[in-house]
Image: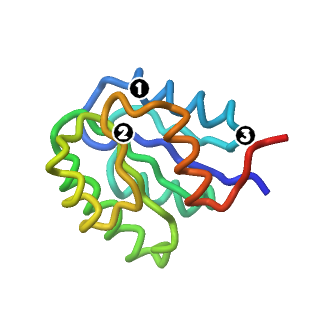
């Protein structure tokens, strides 16, 4: 079974090159990927995640609002009875904020320059999927 991943750019951050690279790497690894595009509202991310029946929401955040946005997405998913959807966060994340994001409900955090193979491996672990054959 192929896991579905939502890659989202919440808030006002308009830079999406990294998110597109991650989306491509996940597709190449055999995942189904839904990409929302830039400047998404938290409510829209939650709605799309539920509608698309994704296993993971990947937030790409470069704006510095990673803790607030992650908290809102996690809370939104729980409020929509979709708390079983894992939320992962990538982008410009100071190392000191990683524990705060995990405490906020993120299943994993991938700061800028995380190797794509590490990202793919960790998402496979989260989703219980293996390499595409």
> What whole-number distance in Å separates the C-alpha atoms at marks 2 and 1?
8 Å
Q: Residues within 10 Å of mark 1 (few under 14, many from 20)?
A: some
Q: Earlier in the sequence, mark 2 or mark 3?
A: 3
Disc nearer the start of the sequence (2/1): 1
Circle nearer the viewer, 2 or 3 = 3
Colour mapping: rainbow
Q: Which residue appears farthest toward the right when viewing the image?
A: 133
- Judged from the image, the secondary structure of the residue bearing numbered disc 3 is loop
**Residue on which the image places disc 1:** 18
Q: Is residue 65 left or right of residue 17?
A: left
Q: Quadrant of the N terminus?
A: bottom right
Q: Residue at x 35, y 65 (%)?
A: 74
Q: Residue at x 40, y 75 (%)?
A: 78
| Mark 2 neighbour density, 10 Å: few (under 14) some (14–19) many (20 or more) | many
Disc 1 is placed on an element classified as: helix
Q: Position of residue 98 (x, y in %)?
A: 24, 52
Q: Quote the CA–CA distance across marks 3 and 1.
A: 19 Å
Q: Which SS class for mark 2?
A: strand
Asked if residue 48 lies left or right of residue 46, the reply is right
Q: Which residue is mark 2?
A: 60
> Are discs 2 and 1 less than 8 Å apart at CB?
yes
Tell me whether circle 2 and circle 3 mark residues in contact (CB < 8 Å).
Answer: no
**Which residue bears the numbered disc 3?**
30
Vertical position of residue 14 compared to residue 58: above or below: above
């Amino acid at each position: 079974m192929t896991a579905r991943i939502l890659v989202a750019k919440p808030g006002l951050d308009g830079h999406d090159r990294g998110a597109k690279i991650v989306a491509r790497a996940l597709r190449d690894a055999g995942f189904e990927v839904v990409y929302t595009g830039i400047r998404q509202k938290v409510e829209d991310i939650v709605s799309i995640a539920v509608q698309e029946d994704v296993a993971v929401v990947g937030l790409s955040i470069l704006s510095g609002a990673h803790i607030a946005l992650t908290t809102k997405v996690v809370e939104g998913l729980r409020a929509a009875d979709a708390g079983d959807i894992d939320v992962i966060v990538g982008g410009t994340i100071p190392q000191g904020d990683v524990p705060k994001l995990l405490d906020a409900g993120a299943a994993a955090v991938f700061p800028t320059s995380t190797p794509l193979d590490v990202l793919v491996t960790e998402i496979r672990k989260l989703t219980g999927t293996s390499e595409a054959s």
